[in-house]
Image (cartoon, grey):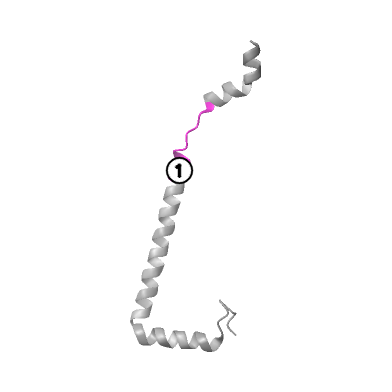
């Protein structure tokens, strides 16, 4: 039994599959699936590249952090 996805029954799923077969043909469906898979894979690779580029180019201001951690603004005004 097919699990309920968007509240669609088994009969409706069969009708949708038959309509898709009639519209695209049996030869064209594997080509469509391959192209969709390649597109999703390309999108994931692009997202990974962007995220690694962002993390690698994130500004690291370790000198400023070490200066700020040793004295607080309150301590500076007292000096």
Quadrant for the C terminus, please. Answer: top right
* Residues packed near mark 1 inside 10 Å, few (<14), some (14 to 19) or many (20 plus): few
Residue that appears at 35% across and 84% down: 23
Left/right of residue 33 with respect to residue 12 in the rendered view: left
Which quadrant of the view contains residue 4? Answer: bottom right
Whether the magenta-drawn stretch holds residue 30 is answered as: no
Magenta stretch in the rendered image? 53-62
Q: Is residue 52 visible?
A: yes
Query: Considering only vertical position in the picture, is 36 above or below 13?
Result: above
**Secondary structure at numbered mark 1:** helix
Query: Number of marks in the image?
Result: 1
Left/right of residue 58 with respect to residue 70 in the rendered view: left
Residue that appears at 58% across and 24% down: 66
Which quadrant of the view contains residue 28? Answer: bottom left
Q: Position of residue 15 (x, y in %)?
A: 47, 88
Query: Considering only vertical position in the picture, is 45 above or below 53?
Result: below
Query: Considering only vertical position in the picture, is 24 above or below 33?
Result: below
Residue located beneath label 1 in the image? 54
Q: Is residue 71 visible?
A: no
Quadrant for the N terminus, please. Answer: bottom right
Residue nearest the viewer, comparing 31 with 8: 8
Q: Position of residue 46 (x, y in %)?
A: 40, 54
Which quadrant of the view contains residue 72? Answer: top right
Residue nearest the viewer, comparing 22 with 38: 22
Q: Position of residue 27 (x, y in %)?
A: 33, 83
Q: Position of residue 65 (x, y in %)?
A: 56, 26
Query: Considering only vertical position in the picture, is 5 above or below 43?
Result: below
Left/right of residue 67 with respect to residue 35 in the rendered view: right
Residue that appears at 44% across and 53% down: 47
Residue that appears at 49% across and 88% down: 14
């Amino acid at each position: 039994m097919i699990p309920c996805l968007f509240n669609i029954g088994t009969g409706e799923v069969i009708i949708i599959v038959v309509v898709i077969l009639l519209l695209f043909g049996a030869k064209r469906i594997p080509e469509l699936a391959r192209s969709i898979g390649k597109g999703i894979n390309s999108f994931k690779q692009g997202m990974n590249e962007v995220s690694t580029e962002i993390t690698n180019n994130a500004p690291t201001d370790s000198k400023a952090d070490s200066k700020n951690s040793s004295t607080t603004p309150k301590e500076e005004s007292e000096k």
